[in-house]
């Protein structure tokens, strides 16, 4: 296990909101050794004490209250240094010491190539690992180039392209539910499933993230990574094991089976939109184009929907709908597996049977199965819903990811060829959108968003 973590971009939202609380949870659970080192670096000129006060404030906001003692220990242990993440000399000084280090790039994706090149020139201690957040590259060519650069620094097994969705309890339950239950796996195919929806819709608006979001948009921010990763777990063939090779081999099989989209397909099967002024609950929300830091001329979308099909024996005839949006009237974050209707319903039932739907709630976590049963009257069909809640997780998603990084378990990390295939799937969409083949439509903040696409 590596006992040295270096966080670049340490004064950013990712570290304050997720990484420091995750380290607190790991310490509270006894996963970090007493000699664990935490080195934090950023361009800001501040003292170590200034940084510790900031870290303590972030933990007050985002860490569990019952872990306050562990949080104090993490904040006190954090060592801060001013450093340029693209300067080999600064990184060499930051990495000085005994033993390997895990270097976490909590940085804007555009800085990744310069930082990886600087790490190469600085010289990483043997056995070190590099951790990168999504999106991995800006497009397919960028992902290929970044993979080549990483290969000059560390072996593929030491590269962790993390996606915290893969560590969410309910996302893991997608695999457990279908692979460990005989009642589901025989039905997990196109003969029984008509459509799978993978949805991340949120009432949250831009919330000061224009610096990153306006250069990415909903397609790159959510669909290209998070939602495609969930698609892989839903659609993959049963792996021989949950080890990193077997699991990731089956995931890339799914991505390679996605039917390539033509321009006509993109026009019929995708939607892009951005929110206008509106009201969400008790607050007024300005139009996205009027948010601070937004360049209206970029045409950045805040809503994206893509309908895909897989060219495989198991899934031919099933559609996969990936949708995400901001500033909507309600939060809806789930995987909805929609089964086909029964082939025949005996005469005498007073109503038609609704198709069954199995829902995996991503946030909040949970599972529901919508069935049809007998209602109050004889032979009158009525909906019946079965609900389950998973046991509370012992660690937050980022806690599990960091623990995997420190232990060298890459099963939930994205392999290099997998990152490239994810871009291949969406490159036709990006190309068609850049040529305005699909218009950028609007929707009021607080609404249900634009109409869904037909998908055929």
Image: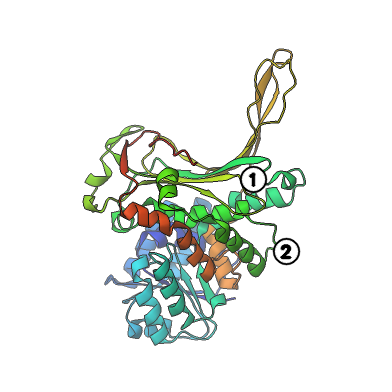
Look at discs 1 and 2 and give the one toward the viewer.
2
Residue 170 rendering spot, x and y as whole percentages: 60, 49
CB atoms of marks 1 and 2 within 8 Å: no
Q: Is residue 111 left or right of residue 97?
A: left
Q: Nearer the viewer, residue 356 or 268?
A: 268
Name the residue tied to disc 2: 240
Residue 455 rendering spot, x and y as whole percentages: 49, 41
Is label 2 in a helix, a strand or a loop? loop
Above or below, 332 relative to 14: above
Is label 1 in a helix, a strand or a loop? loop
Nearest to N terminus: mark 1 or mark 2: 2
From where the camera sits, is residue 327 visible? Answer: yes
Above or below, 378 relative to 24: above
Q: Nearer the viewer, residue 251 or 286?
A: 251
Residue located at (29% from left, 72% from top): 43
Residue located at (53% from left, 54% from top): 259
Q: Is residue 268 left or right of residue 114?
A: right
Residue located at (43% from left, 69% from top): 143
Please rate how many residues cluster around mark 1, counting C-alpha atoms within 10 Å: few if below 14, some from 14 to 19, many from 20: few
Q: Quadrant of the N terminus?
A: bottom right
Please rate how many residues cluster around mark 2, counting C-alpha atoms within 10 Å: few if below 14, some from 14 to 19, many from 20: few
- Give the distance between the C-alpha atoms of the residues marked 1 and 2, in whole angstroms: 25 Å
Q: Nearer the viewer, residue 366 or 241?
A: 241
Name the residue tied to disc 1: 390
Residue 190 rendering spot, x and y as whole percentages: 65, 44
From where the camera sits, is residue 70 visible? Answer: no
Residue 337 rendering spot, x and y as whole percentages: 60, 41
Q: Is residue 92 left or right of residue 407?
A: left
Q: Is residue 295 left or right of residue 172?
A: left
């Amino acid at each position: 296990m590596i006992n040295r973590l270096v966080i670049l971009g340490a004064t950013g939202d990712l570290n304050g909101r997720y990484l420091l609380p995750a380290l607190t949870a790991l310490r509270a659970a006894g996963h970090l050794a007493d000699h664990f080192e935490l080195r934090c670096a950023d361009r800001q000129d501040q003292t170590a004490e200034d940084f510790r006060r900031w870290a303590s404030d972030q933990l007050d906001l985002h860490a569990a209250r019952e872990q306050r003692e562990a949080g104090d220990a993490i904040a006190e242990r954090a060592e801060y240094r001013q450093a340029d993440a693209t300067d080999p000399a600064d990184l060499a000084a930051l990495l000085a010491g005994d033993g390997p280090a895990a270097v976490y790039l909590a940085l804007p994706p555009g800085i990744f190539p310069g930082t990886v090149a600087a790490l190469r020139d600085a010289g990483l201690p043997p056995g070190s690992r590099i951790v990168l957040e999504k999106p991995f590259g800006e497009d397919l060519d960028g992902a290929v180039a970044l993979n080549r650069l990483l290969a000059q620094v560390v072996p593929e097994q030491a590269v962790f392209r993390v996606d915290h969705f893969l560590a969410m309890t309910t996302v893991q339950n997608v695999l457990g539910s279908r692979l460990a239950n005989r009642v589901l796996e025989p039905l997990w195919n196109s003969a029984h499933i008509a459509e799978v929806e993978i949805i991340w819709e949120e009432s949250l608006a831009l919330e000061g993230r224009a610096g990153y979001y306006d250069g990415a948009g909903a397609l790159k921010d959510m669909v290209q990574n998070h939602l495609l990763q969930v698609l892989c777990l839903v659609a993959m063939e049963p792996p021989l094991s949950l080890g990193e090779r077997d699991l990731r081999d089956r995931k890339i099989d799914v991505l390679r089976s996605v039917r390539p989209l033509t321009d006509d397909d993109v026009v019929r099967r995708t939607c892009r939109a951005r929110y206008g002024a509106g009201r969400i609950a008790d607050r007024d929300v300005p139009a996205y184009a009027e948010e601070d830091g937004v360049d209206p001329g970029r045409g950045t979308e805040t809503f994206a929907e893509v309908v895909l099909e897989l060219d495989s024996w198991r899934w031919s005839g099933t559609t996969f709908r990936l949708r995400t949006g901001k500033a909507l009237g309600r939060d809806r974050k789930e995987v909805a597996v929609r089964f086909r209707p029964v082939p025949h319903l005996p005469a005498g039932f007073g109503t038609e049977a609704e198709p069954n739907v199995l829902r995996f709630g991503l946030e909040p976590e949970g599972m529901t199965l919508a069935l049809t049963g007998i209602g109050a009257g004889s032979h009158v069909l009525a909906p019946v819903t079965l609900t389950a809640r998973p046991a509370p997780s012992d660690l937050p998603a980022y806690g599990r990811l960091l623990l995997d990084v420190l232990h060298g378990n890459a099963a939930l990390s994205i392999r290099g060829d997998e990152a490239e295939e994810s871009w291949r799937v969406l490159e036709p969409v990006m190309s068609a959108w850049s040529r305005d083949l699909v218009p950028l439509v609007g929707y009021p903040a607080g609404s249900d968003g634009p109409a869904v696409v037909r998908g055929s």
